[in-house]
């Protein structure tokens, strides 16, 4: 079983920055991609960013390009999300995910609140 521990988030003013991290533990050898989705109450879940754990592709949601940066530590099986130029519209609960192969499974963190407000 894979467990995900999220940290970071909180309250920031518009234009500010926040960082999130997500550490995978347990049977992580088959984890091949990690990242985040976010959910605003009353709206559908949105893909934020994802990164392959073997040097593969990095992908971003359209709203995240140019403002958010995802990175990883392959040894620690940890993903990081640096968010800059935050806007009130970025207010959401951010959920870390990890995809596992053989057979395919998805794992999710507990979610962390990001609030952008003056």
Image (tube, helix red, strand yellow):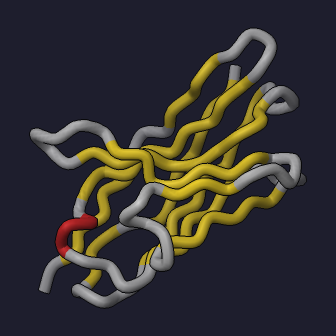
Question: How many badges with numbers are in the image?
Answer: 0
Q: Is residue 78 visible?
A: no
Q: Residue 75 location, x and y as percent? A: 89, 53
In the figure, 29 relative to 34: above or below? Answer: above
Residue in the foreground of this view, choosing between 25 and 56: 56
Q: Residue 84, located in which quarter of the rendered image?
A: bottom left
User: Which residue of the protein is positioned furthest toward the front in this rendering?
Assistant: 62
Q: Residue 12 location, x and y as percent? A: 28, 81
In the figure, 53 relative to 8: above or below? Answer: above
User: Which residue of the protein is positioned furthest toward the top in this rendering?
Assistant: 103
**Residue sitting at x 23%, y 86%:** 14
- The quadrant the C terminus occupies is bottom left
- The quadrant the N terminus occupies is top right
**Residue sitting at x 45%, y 56%:** 61
Q: Is residue 82 visible?
A: yes
Q: Residue 7 location, x and y as percent? A: 51, 59
Q: In the figure, is residue 45 to the left or right of 17?
A: left
**Residue sitting at x 14%, y 43%:** 41
């Amino acid at each position: 079983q894979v467990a995900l521990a999220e940290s970071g988030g909180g309250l920031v003013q518009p234009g500010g920055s926040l960082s999130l991290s997500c550490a995978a533990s347990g049977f992580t050898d088959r984890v091949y991609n990690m990242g985040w989705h976010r959910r605003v109450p009353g709206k559908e879940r949105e893909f934020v960013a994802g990164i392959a754990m073997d040097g593969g592709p990095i992908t971003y949601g359209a709203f995240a390009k140019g403002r958010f940066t995802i990175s990883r530590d392959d040894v620690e099986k940890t993903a990081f999300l640096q968010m800059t130029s935050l806007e009130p519209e970025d207010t959401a609960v951010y959920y870390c995910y990890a995809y596992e192969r053989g057979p395919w499974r998805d794992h999710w963190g507990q979610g962390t609140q990001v609030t952008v407000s003056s």
